[in-house]
Image (cartoon, helix red, strand yellow):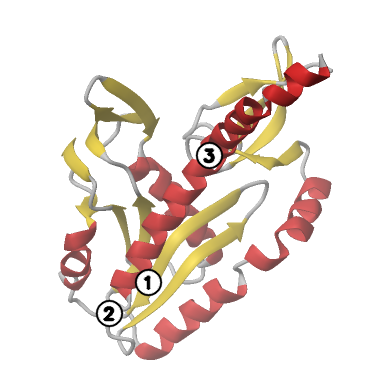
Amino acid sequence: MINKLIELWPLWLFLLLVLIIKIIRPLIKGIIGETAVAFVLKFLSKKDYKVMHNVTLYGNSYKSQIDHIIVSKFGVFVLETKHYKGWIMGSEHTQYWAQVIYKSKKRFYNPILQNHGHVKALKGFLSNYPYIKYIPIVVFTWNSTLKIHTSSEVVKIFSLLKTIKRYKQNVLSDSLKEEIFEIIKSNNRKKSQKNQMHKISKNSHQQMSYSEKCPYCSGILVIKNGKYGQFKGCSGFPTCRYSKAIASH
């Protein structure tokens, strides 16, 4: 028996590697996309645009992870990055879009709606500045072909700078631009995520399941009470309606 197990160790190693790759592949894809967009944004004038990457904001029982924020005198740009290949199909208000690669079709949460959630989170932290112009942009990298129907800004990475520079009307003074940038920077909780989530869980009526992210919108899963008992649902409800059963032990 032991000899058979020893003989099979290359197979077990292969299966383990496959499992690891499957787990980390979405993370790698996200990092590649965000890194590529961050590189393109380096070509913006530092005088006119102040750029932040990977911003995490906590509110009352929610967390918003924003890929890129650009504070400028022309408005606040909120960027959601997608590193997908194949055909991307969807429309403005549908809850899910589709990624089509030959005969394979996978759906994912509408990134326009996802980015609207990020804008809403920012408005909460910048409520003293109701006149800010927010410009949400969804950015797809080079491998995708967009076949979408939307009036919102959904662009390929090659058109990103051109899209940003199309906004030329001054809406913020230089001093307000700096002030808003510092507010966002000071509320970025990326470095103290665990402590902040602990504080939120004490003040909330819902138990936070902050070790799990919503696979559709990157929100956090919270434990809720339903007709048939407890289940895990997205904190972004009703915008995002993802839910999953709680495994029994």
Residue 76: in sight, yes or no?
Answer: yes
Other residues around mark 3 within 10 Å, as few (<14) / some (14–19) / many (≥20): few
Other residues around mark 1 within 10 Å, as few (<14) / some (14–19) / many (≥20): many
Q: Nearer the viewer, mark 2 or mark 3?
A: 3
Q: CA distance from mark 2 to mark 1?
A: 10 Å
Amino acid tagged 1:
Ile
Number of marks: 3
Residue 51 position, x and y percent, is 40, 75
Quadrant (top left/top right/bottom left/bottom right) for the N terminus? top right
Residue 78 position, x and y percent, is 37, 61
Q: Which residue is mark 2?
A: 44
Residue 109 position, x and y percent, is 40, 34
Indicate the secondary structure of the residue bearing disc 2: loop
Q: Which residue is mark 3?
A: 21
Q: Are marks 2 and 1 in contact (CB under 8 Å)?
A: yes
Q: CA distance from mark 1 to mark 3?
A: 33 Å
**Going from the N terminus, do you reach mark 2 or mark 1 first?**
2
**Going from the N terminus, do you reach mark 2 or mark 3 first?**
3
**Going from the N terminus, do you reach mark 1 or mark 3 first?**
3
Q: Is residue 140 left or right of residue 4?
A: left
Amino acid tagged 2:
Leu
Q: Is residue 88 left or right of residue 188?
A: left
